[in-house]
């Protein structure tokens, strides 16, 4: 038990003195996950919001496909991206493998089905009711769709931070396409894995503490916004 207590003590010291490697890894993790979340959400939320507001044959097929892709193992996503970006792959000439850009691409592919599925189901279950109300009041198709998005913005923001939470906690795909190169592509999850395997727990514990705090903050924000949206709905 002594080495655990000593590890936590050293981890706290690393955090408090703003260790350069620690700060670098945290900032890189946030950059990769925030960028991936913004790109994926910027495409998925508008498209699947408008798609979910429309009634058409085969709606259930879209839902099933999105939920299927949402459960795709992260290592499979990493493998696909790695094969595409490898030197002999179709995009090998871009020299993106083992870079931060490759990690962002992998995270975008991983989280896109998640935010898409949540948005699509929200549009079908709640958006259509709001859209119908807008049309009853004389709004056109575009304005009623915009009204649905505005009314559901708090829920959509919850989806956004849920997606970010999924991205920042990912290990397999970013390790495969990023290579976990120290000072270049190592992020919090992959660094924790590496230092744990090396038996050097101080930095791993420090990064674990930051990941837990990030998760707590994200869940607190999501819970607050969810409560706000429920009160607004009532």
Image (tube, rainbow, N blue to C red):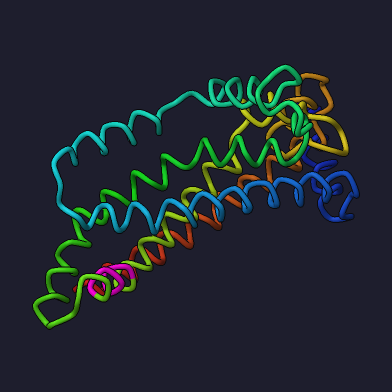
Q: Residue at x 77, y 26 (%)?
A: 179
- Establish if 168 lies above or below 127: above
Residues in magenta, as a range: 144-149
Q: Residue at x 27, y 54 (%)?
A: 122
User: In x, y percent, where is residue 148?
Assistant: 26, 69
**7 in magenta:** no
User: In x, y percent, where is residue 135?
Assistant: 13, 75
Q: Main secondary structure of the magenta part?
A: helix
Count of all numbered marks drawn on residues in the image: 0
- Establish if 189 lies above or below 152: above
For the question of whether residue 4 can be seen, the reply is no
Q: Which quadrant is the C terminus positioned in?
A: bottom left
| 163 relative position to 182: left or right | left
Q: Nearer the viewer, residue 173 or 23?
A: 173
Q: Which quadrant is the N terminus positioned in?
A: top right
| 139 relative position to 114: left or right | left
Q: Nearer the viewer, residue 32 or 196?
A: 32
User: In x, y percent, where is residue 188?
Assistant: 72, 39
């Amino acid at each position: 038990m002594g080495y655990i207590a000593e590890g936590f003590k050293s981890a706290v010291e690393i955090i408090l003195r703003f260790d350069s490697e620690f700060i670098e890894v945290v900032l890189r993790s946030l950059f990769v996950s925030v960028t991936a979340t913004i790109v994926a959400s910027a495409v998925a939320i508008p498209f699947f919001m408008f798609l979910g507001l429309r009634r058409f044959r085969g709606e259930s097929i879209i839902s099933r496909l999105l939920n299927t892709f949402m459960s795709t193992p992260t290592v499979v996503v990493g493998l696909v991206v790695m094969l595409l970006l490898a030197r002999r792959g179709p995009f090998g000439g871009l020299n993106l493998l083992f870079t931060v850009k490759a990690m962002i691409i992998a995270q975008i592919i991983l989280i896109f089905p998640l935010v898409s599925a949540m948005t699509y189901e929200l549009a079908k279950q709640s958006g259509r009711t709001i859209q119908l109300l807008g049309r009853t009041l004389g709004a056109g198709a575009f304005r009623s769709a915009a009204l649905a998005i505005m009314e559901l913005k708090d829920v959509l923001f919850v989806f956004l931070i849920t997606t970010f939470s999924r991205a920042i906690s990912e290990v397999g795909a970013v390790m495969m396409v990023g290579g976990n190169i120290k000072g270049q592509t190592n992020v919090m999850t992959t660094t924790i894995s590496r230092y744990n395997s090396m038996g050097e727990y101080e930095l791993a514990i420090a990064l674990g503490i930051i990941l837990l705090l990030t998760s707590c903050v994200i869940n607190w924000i999501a819970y607050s916004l969810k409560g706000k949206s429920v009160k607004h709905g009532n």
